[in-house]
């Protein structure tokens, strides 16, 4: 008759040896410590790659060529309310680039990189002669892409599509383009707002961007066109599409939904202003309360875009096969959180 084997603690072993690692006393703290060490090692590795003589020389040349466009861009982010989202998008772009890292199979492509660099420097020089800020800033993005291709190849640019897109969205559009876009948005917001007021049986007369209601006159200014919220919501749609969604078509569908949501909600904001001015207090049509109302509408738009993104993600999980990890294994459903599989794998 044989004696059955005893569990390790009863057989004289350490009580912690038979427990899963995460359930050991202090196991979670050790995991966090190892994760911090791994993250620091990864950061140090990337820093060493950039701090090489070639990397430092490249950075110095880029700073010399693009110091002025970079300064003007940061100044616009700081002083222009229409471009303030750049203060958030630029750090996010750097963070996403760091988190994505360099492809293990990255190979330099000197020819294509040199062509992009020459084109970027050429556009920078021509734009400087013509005092055209948008092209000058765009040339900075082109030169950055050239540097990445020169050192790591075209596939690395594809891997960093989100940082490059965020950086592109942070560049303010030219005034002539903004005016072309803002004016139709003003008219559209006025029409939606006036229609909703009429639907609520409030006497209303719409003349261009001026909404007349009894004893009051509302002017839908350029600042109320919704262009600012539209730009911010497009950036949000790009971010959510990269983080939550997996398929490029799903991401494009989300972006396509952002535009009507922003336009309709801006019309609703005009309606709310008229409604409150007519029924409550004319002072609510301007000043702090008017800005607060705009923030509240933007938060609603934020929530709608988020709900749309997670709704499309739920459809993806039912339709698309589970994504693969880098080692070829399947990621269990549901797939949420950063980084999205396609983004991480490039």
Image: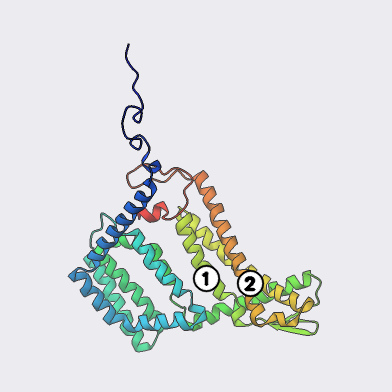
Residue at (62, 74) in percent of width and height:
294
The quadrant of the picture occupied by the C terminus is bottom left
Q: Position of residue 28 (x, y in %)?
A: 39, 48
Is residue 102 in view?
no
Q: Secondary structure at mark 1?
A: helix
Circle nearer the N terminus (2, 1)? 1
Q: Which colour scheme appears in the figure?
A: rainbow
Tag shown at residue 184? none
Q: Quadrant of residue 210?
A: bottom right
Tag shown at residue 232? 1
Q: Position of residue 27 (x, y in %)?
A: 37, 46
What residue is shown with label 2? 266
Q: CA distance from mark 2 to mark 1?
A: 13 Å
Residue at (40, 70) in percent of width and height:
91
Q: Quadrant of residue 109?
A: bottom left
Image position of 168 with respect to 67: above or below? above
């Amino acid at each position: 008759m044989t004696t059955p084997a005893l569990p390790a603690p009863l057989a004289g072993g350490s009580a912690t040896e038979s427990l899963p690692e995460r359930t050991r006393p202090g196991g979670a703290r050790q995991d966090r410590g190892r994760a911090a060490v791994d993250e620091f090692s990864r950061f140090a590795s990337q820093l060493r790659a950039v701090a090489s003589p070639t990397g430092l020389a490249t950075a110095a040349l880029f700073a010399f060529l693009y110091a002025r466009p970079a300064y003007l861009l940061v100044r616009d982010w700081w002083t222009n309310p229409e471009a303030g989202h750049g203060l958030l998008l630029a750090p996010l772009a750097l963070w996403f680039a760091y988190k994505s890292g360099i492809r293990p199979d990255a190979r330099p492509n000197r020819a294509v990189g040199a062509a992009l660099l020459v084109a970027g420097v050429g556009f920078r020089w021509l734009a400087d002669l013509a005092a055209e800020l948008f092209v000058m800033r765009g040339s900075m993005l082109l030169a950055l892409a050239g540097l990445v291709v020169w050192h790591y190849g075209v596939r690395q640019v594809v891997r960093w599509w989100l940082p490059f897109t965020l950086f592109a969205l942070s560049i303010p559009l030219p005034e002539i383009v903004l005016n072309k876009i803002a004016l139709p948005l003003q008219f559209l917001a006025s029409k939606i707002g006036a229609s909703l007021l009429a639907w609520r049986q409030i006497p209303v007369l719409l003349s261009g961007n001026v909404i007349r209601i009894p004893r009051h006159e509302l002017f839908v200014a350029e600042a109320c066109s919704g262009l600012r919220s539209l730009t911010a919501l497009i950036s949000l749609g790009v971010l959510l599409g990269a983080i939550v969604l997996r398929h490029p078509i799903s991401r494009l569908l989300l972006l396509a939904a952002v535009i009507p949501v922003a336009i309709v909600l801006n019309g609703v904001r005009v309606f709310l202003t008229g409604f409150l001015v007519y029924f409550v207090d004319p002072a609510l049509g301007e000043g702090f309360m008017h800005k607060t109302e705009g923030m509240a509408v933007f938060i609603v738009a934020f929530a709608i875009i988020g709900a749309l993104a997670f709704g499309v993600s739920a459809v993806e999980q039912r339709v698309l096969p589970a994504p693969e990890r880098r080692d070829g294994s399947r990621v269990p459903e549901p797939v949420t959180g950063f980084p999205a599989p396609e983004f991480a794998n490039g």
